[in-house]
Image (cartoon, grey):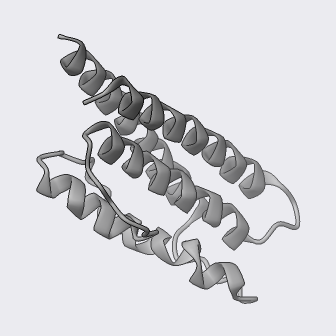
Amino acid sequence: MTATAIEEASRLLRIASADFAACVALIEAPGVRFANAAFHGQQAIEKALKAVLTARGENFGRTHNLVALAGQLSEVGEVLPDTGDLLSLVNPYAVTLRYDDLDDELLSAHSLRNVVATMIEWDNGRLVAIREMKSN
């Protein structure tokens, strides 16, 4: 593992945190479609998952699929937080529901906030652990 991979993973986590902040702001903003907020929540989770894969030196290709990214992390020995089916419920907000004029909420704003916060917190912990492991 190179410092470059850790630096890139840290960069992805910073962007994920900013996406989460945008998600929360849009949830609370009057007149904003839930799908717009959920898009930023999906982006935050995607970048968090990709950050750990990057820190581990894993390739992940071009995908927005949270379930596939989580599965890849599990395959390399990462133990992810139990999010139930929430990752699959957030997945459609990457592309499909972003271009739909229906405002179907596949999950609640509360669940969206919680799953994004959980994944970013997990990511923070994993990056600290990987950084420490690589520095020893």
Vertical order, 67 against 92 (above or below): above
Vertical order, 114 against 100 (above or below): above
**In this picture, residue 124 sits left or right of residue 100:** left
**Residue at the spot x=82%, y=66% of the render?**
32
**Residue at the spot x=71%, y=48% of the render?**
22
Residue 34 placement: quadrant: bottom right
Residue 103 placement: quadrant: bottom right
Quadrant that contains the N terminus: top left
Q: Of 35 and 72, which appears nearest the observer?
A: 72
**Residue at the spot x=61%, y=46% of the render?**
20
**Residue at the spot x=46%, y=36% of the render?**
8
Residue 12 screen position, x and y as percent: 51, 41
Residue 56 placement: quadrant: top left
Residue at the extreme top of the image, as rendered: 136
**In this picture, residue 86 sits left or right of residue 33:** left
Residue 106 screen position, x and y as percent: 53, 77
Residue 134 screen position, x and y as percent: 22, 20
Residue 65 screen position, x and y as percent: 40, 71
Vertical order, 111 against 121 (above or below): below
